Amino acid sequence: MAFSIKSGDADMTHGSISSELLKFAIPMAIGLLFQQLYNTVDAMVVGQYVGKAALAAVGSTASIVNMLIGLFAGLSTGAGVVISQAYGAKAEKRLSEAVQTTITLTFILSAVATIIGILIVDPMLRLMDTPEDVLPEAKAYLTIYFAGSTGLLFYNMGSGILRAVGDSRRPLYFLCFAAIVNVVFDLLFVVGFRMGVEGAAYATIISELLSALLVMYVLTKTDAPYAIKWKSLSLHFSAVKQIFSIGFPSSIQQALTSFSNVFVQSYINFFQTDCMAGYSSYNKLDAFILIPVQSLALASSTFVGQNYGAGQLKRGRDGVKKTLYMSIIVTAALTVLTMIFSGPLLSLFNDDPGVIEYGKKFVLIISPFYVTICFNQVFAGALRGIGRSTAPMIIMLSSFVAFRQLFLYCNKAFFGHSFIGTALAYPMGWVVCSILMIICYKRSALGKASDDAAGAVVK
């Protein structure tokens, strides 16, 4: 059967670069927006209807959730790169094998994530020095979340397959539907049934499971080469090797970065419940600000992967440049708006004056550095798109783990655990990471692609 482009897929090896990037990134951004609504609605509902201790509990769990999920998200990234390269090269057999391997791995990894997640809940919360008034609710929320993490993992893997072939619309539709369901169940369980943080956790895992079922249904029913063939699920060694060689460094980087953030959270916990709740509120705003650069970086990674597979190195480089310009402009605009309207935005989560005051401090100190994230996210995505994932991993671990922990240690040793020093730990890591990532990208084959290399074939 001849390789063909199906409805909803995007062949990014032809056409306007900006148009192709935006057609992919905008639905992706909307999808990330709705995905972020999961935790944001949880925080808003528990913060307004349960209290600031509950808001602090939900917020303090983020680094632990991200630590475990990040370990498997990197493998999703690796699978996406392998699939996008096979798709760009029109290698139908290799594409199908990569998809069947990806789904088989998801079954295995979801079981591992559930078991390990439940086991680490109590020790990790205590490692973070979680205050006693927050600990019971944080433990309940995390236990339920990890018990139902299968839906999240299958949605991320399944939607990653669709995005790798250029289809970012259908994952968006499913995510929008699931986010609406999440809001309904949040209000029903937390406000109606008064189930507290446990109700918020149940609402989240139910809605994530629905989104997973929808994306799996689409991948099963399509007749494209990337269809899931349940009777043919297996681990193809060549695909496993490629997925792990590209994705494992990213997995380690994300997991260790999140593990490092567990210690950052412990420094924040030092300032007690008001600061924890304020940071939780700020962190939700932070996530929304970063949606454009994340979606553009993912679009660029798929764009680079397809063009690298097709032997169009110079076109891939041009796509990275345009992605960076767009990311900087949008991120700068959102930063200004957030700083201007920080008070009203933070009050959506909890109207306690102490909580809002701490939230404003985080916004004021961290927001001016958001533009620096554009460089490390876009260039890291581009490097992964050509299969170079080890260098971004080393750079991010050095910046987000080693440097950040050293910065916090020095802040505690020389400045007596100052609040400003604690808040600056994140942006200082971004700055260091961006500088190193720029250097790495410039030295890569993609960064060196010349203007007259448009027709060069990748060897």
Image: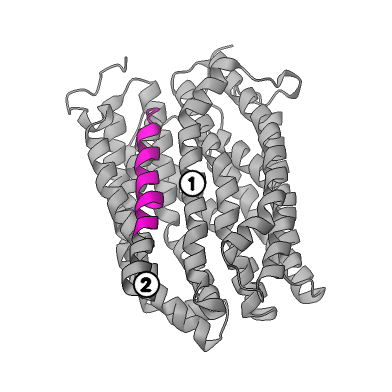
Which residue bears the numbered disc 2? 337
User: Residue at the bottom extreme?
Assistant: 353
Residue 393 visible in the snapshot: yes
- Residue 184 visible? The answer is no
- Choose the circle earlier in sequence order: 2 or 1: 1
Q: Are marks 2 and 1 in contact (CB under 8 Å)?
A: no
Image mark for residue 227: none
> Residue 459, how many percent across, how many down?
32, 14
Residue at 58%, 60% in the rendered image: 127
Determine whether 329 is above or below 309 in the image: below
Res. 134 image quadrant: bottom right
Residue 394, position in %: x, y?
A: 37, 39
**Which residue shows up at 78% across the image and 69% down it?**
189
Residue furthest to the right: 193
**Which span of residues is magenta-colored?**
386-406
Q: Which is closer to the viewer, label 2 or label 1?
A: 1
What residue is disc 1 on? 256
Q: In which quadrant of the rendered image does the N terminus lie?
A: top right
Magenta residues, dominant SS class: helix
Identify the amino acid type marked 2: Leu
Task: Name the residue: 72% across, 18% down.
Answer: 232
Q: Secondary structure at mark 1?
A: helix
Q: Name the residue rendered at 35%, 68% in the picture.
A: 413
Residue 349 higher or lower than 83, as above or below: below
**Residue 81 location in percent, x, y?**
47, 30
Residue 403 place in picture, x, y as percent: 34, 53
Badge 1 amino acid:
Leu
Q: Quadrant of residue 186?
A: bottom right
Q: Nearer the viewer, residue 111 or 339?
A: 111
